[in-house]
Amino acid sequence: MFTVNYSGTLTAFNAATGATDWSRALPGQSAFTSPPTAADGYVYTGGAGSGGTVYAVSEASGQIAWTAAVENGDDSLAQPSTHSAASM
């Protein structure tokens, strides 16, 4: 289970116990309103403030795997969506 607060702290919780597994401050932006989306071992979310950024974070470790600039900041990512090649 994953949450992100307005300041950009992404937190993973153990679904069985509610304990915090890890927490990561996402860099480069100041406002985070899009809910995190988990798929294929990564958590995706977006932030705004200085343009916008989408983040891919490892579900297991909390390490940032990659970031990408997006237009319109958080408004570009009302909720990140994913799709699997297997569903094509």
Image (spheres, rainbow, N blue to C red):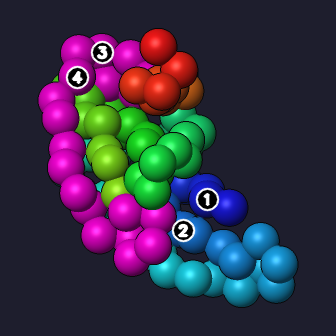
Q: Nearer the viewer, mark 3 or mark 1?
A: 1
> Nearer the N terminus, badge 3 or badge 1?
1
Residues packed near mark 4 inside 10 Å, few (<14), some (14 to 19) or many (20 plus): some
C-alpha separation, residue under disc 1 versus residue under disc 2: 6 Å
Q: Which residue is mark 3?
A: 72
Q: Nearer the viewer, mark 3 or mark 2?
A: 2
C-alpha separation, residue under disc 2 versus residue under disc 4: 22 Å
Q: Residue at x 43, y 43 (%)?
A: 44
Q: Position of residue 82 (x, y in %)?
A: 47, 28
Question: Disc number at residue 70?
Answer: 4
At label 4, the amino acid type is Val
C-alpha separation, residue under disc 3 versus residue under disc 1: 24 Å
Q: Which residues are magenta?
A: 58-77
Q: Position of residue 45 (x, y in %)?
A: 43, 41
Q: Report which quarter residue 79 is drawn in.
A: top right
Label 2 SS: strand
C-alpha separation, residue under disc 4 versus residue under disc 1: 22 Å
Q: Which residue is mark 1?
A: 2
At label 3, the amino acid type is Asn
> Is 60 located above or below residue 56 in the figure?
below
Tell me the quarter of the image containing the N terminus.
bottom right
Q: Position of residue 10 (x, y in %)?
A: 48, 62
Image marks 4 and 3: residues in contact by CB distance under 8 Å: yes
Magenta run includes residue 76: yes
C-alpha separation, residue under disc 3 versus residue under disc 2: 24 Å
